[in-house]
Image (spheres, grey):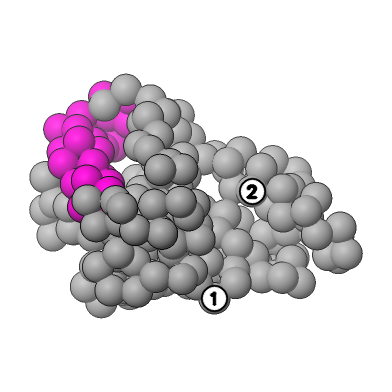
């Protein structure tokens, strides 16, 4: 198999008081690991066992797609946050956000609207398209922007298991904390830089 669980990039308690160690431990050890276990048992001894996670995501459907995408989405979500995150993006990303959303505050509001407006389980995303244009979107259940040829830059998990132990039904309160205190701008900027490096024809962002 070409992939396995990536370690959580920080300790269970590293995002406290905004996200509790209890939430992170359940979320990583039970939910994320559970999707990986399901995926591995579904694809073992099939041709998919030789594919990358991204290949499975764009080609598979049904239960295999759901498990593979949830594995990828969680890896990406852990890295979209960091202890002492939040604040202001670095200059390259800030310029792109200013250009596309009219400022960081207005981007944060768009992201919160996408996260709280997603009916039921899903994900809120900052993505870039093949022209290097940024947009905010949400997806339901396990769906992932890679399916539409878009490049994810940041995500927020809005399944209830991401916040229910900490803020119960208050998804907005959880999203506010992620955006103000935990968002990892450096990760988003690195993802954007990688996209423009891989596709040098993109207009400067
Ligand atoms: Mn989750």
Q: Residue at x 66, y 70 (%)?
A: 129
Specify whether 189 is left or right of 202.
Answer: left
Instruction: Name which quarter of the figure residue 29 lies in.
Output: top left
Q: Residue at x 76, y 72 (%)?
A: 131
Q: Quadrant of the N terminus?
A: top left
Q: Position of residue 188 (x, y in %)?
A: 59, 47
Specify whether 133 is left or right of 199.
Answer: left
Q: As displayed, is residue 38 above or below residue 6?
A: below
Q: Residue at x 34, y 66 (%)?
A: 65
Instruction: Name which quarter of the figure residue 98 lies in.
Output: bottom right
Q: Which mark is residue 94?
A: none
Q: Position of residue 26 (x, y in %)?
A: 16, 38
Question: SS class of the residue under badge 2?
Answer: helix
Residue 38: within the magenta?
yes
Residue 21 in sight: yes
Residue indicated by mark 2: 191
- Asked whether 199 or 139 is in front, the reply is 199
Label the magenta part by its dominant secondary structure. helix
Q: Residue at x 52, y 40 (%)?
A: 184
Residue indicated by mark 1: 148
Residue 148: within the magenta?
no
Specify whether 48 is left or right of 195.
Answer: left
Q: Which residues are magenta?
A: 13-40
Q: Position of residue 186 (x, y in %)?
A: 61, 38
């Amino acid at each position: 198999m070409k992939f396995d669980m990536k370690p959580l990039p920080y300790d269970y308690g590293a995002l406290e008081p905004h996200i509790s160690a209890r939430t992170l431990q359940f979320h990583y050890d039970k939910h994320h690991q559970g999707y990986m276990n399901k995926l591995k048992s579904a694809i073992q001894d099939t041709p998919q066992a030789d594919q990358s996670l991204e290949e499975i995501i764009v080609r598979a459907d049904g239960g295999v797609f759901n498990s593979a995408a949830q594995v990828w989405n969680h890896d990406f979500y852990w890295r979209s946050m960091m202890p002492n995150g939040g604040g202001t993006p670095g200059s390259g990303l800030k310029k792109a956000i200013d250009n596309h959303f009219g400022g960081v505050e207005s981007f944060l509001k768009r992201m919160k609207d996408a996260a709280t407006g997603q009916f039921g389980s899903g994900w809120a995303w900052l993505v870039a398209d093949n022209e290097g244009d940024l947009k905010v979107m949400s997806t339901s259940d396990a769906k992932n922007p890679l399916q539409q040829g878009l490049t994810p830059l940041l995500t927020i998990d809005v399944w209830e298991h991401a916040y229910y132990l900490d803020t119960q039904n208050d998804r907005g309160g959880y999203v506010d904390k992620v955006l103000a205190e935990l968002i990892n701008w450096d990760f988003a900027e690195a993802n954007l830089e990688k996209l423009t490096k891989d596709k040098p024809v993109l207009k400067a962002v």
